[in-house]
Amino acid sequence: MTKESPLGKLITSLQKKISEGGLGKAAIADATKDLAKLGYQYDEESFPPLVGTEDFTSNISASPRDLAEALLWKLGKWKAYKKFCENYAAEKPAPTKTNVVFYAFAMHLKDKKNPIYDQHAIRSLWAICGKLSADERLKFKSLLFDKKNKWKQSGTGKSAIDCYNIFVKHVNDLVSISEGASKSELDRLIMPLGQAIKEATKKYAEFDALCGWSGNG
């Protein structure tokens, strides 16, 4: 798939808008609709609105106390859940390279000013944001591609924390000049866009061609 494909043209359009001064609220809405026409959209059923998350309790006991906790225990996620609760409760939590996504989500639940972060969101930012430095792009590549230049199953590696900080910086920049768009509206675009990109490309060269970098990505 290349930049001349429908997905490639959508990415090129977003790149152009960002380079010309910002991705406005209307542009985000239009791109979200265009992406939906290609079969990719935010899954409202799987990810309903998060309401009142700033007031969640984070007290955790030695054993599950309700159905939600019992399900996490059954799924083998009890230790991860305990760490997640610790990050939510901590005054100044710090991520590790193995828990950045859950750390970022805990920060989002505490304060919606913090963006939701995952492999799809960072893949989208990499594809559309021409303001990334060469070093930032290399860190994204290290996070998302393996040694055979194929997409990893999930974002992993020593650059994980750096990539999160880079992501937050650029998302904040995009939203600050977006003519009123929220991080939630941006998330509803970049999450399914990242999924579309991963399904449309398998190796770095294909991703490069889709984004139209001509080897400069």
Image: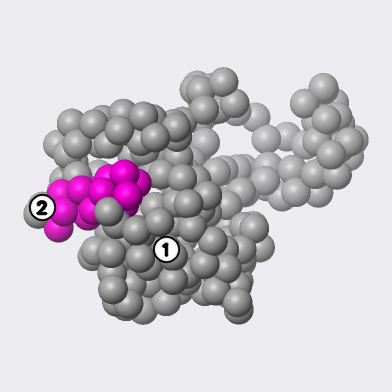
Front tag of 2 and 1: 1
Predominant SS of the magenta segment: helix
Element at badge 1? helix
At x 28% / y 64%, what residue is drawn? 212
Q: In this view, does 171 lie to the left or right of 102?
A: left
Mark 2 and mark 1 residues within 8 Å of each other at the beta carbon? no
- Residue type at mark 2 is Gly
120 above or below 138? above
The segment highlighted magenta reads: 5-19
Q: In this view, does 26 lie to the left or right of 50?
A: left
At x 10% / y 52%, what residue is drawn? 21
At x 47% / y 69%, what residue is drawn? 204
Q: Which label sits on residue 207?
A: 1
The question of residue 18 being in magenta is answered with yes
The question of residue 137 being in magenta is answered with no
Quarter of the image containing the C terminus?
bottom left
Chain-order first, disc 2 or disc 1:
2
Dot 2: few (<14), some (14–19), or many (≥20) neighbours within 10 Å? few
24 above or below 99? above
Q: Which label sits on residue 184?
A: none
How far from the left and from the top, in percent, is residue 6? 31, 44
Q: Quadrant of residue 106?
A: top right
- Residue 132 seen: yes
How far from the left and from the top, in percent, is residue 138? 42, 76
211, 141: nearer the viewer: 211
- Residue type at mark 1 is Phe
- Residue 182 seen: no
Q: Which label sits on residue 21?
A: 2
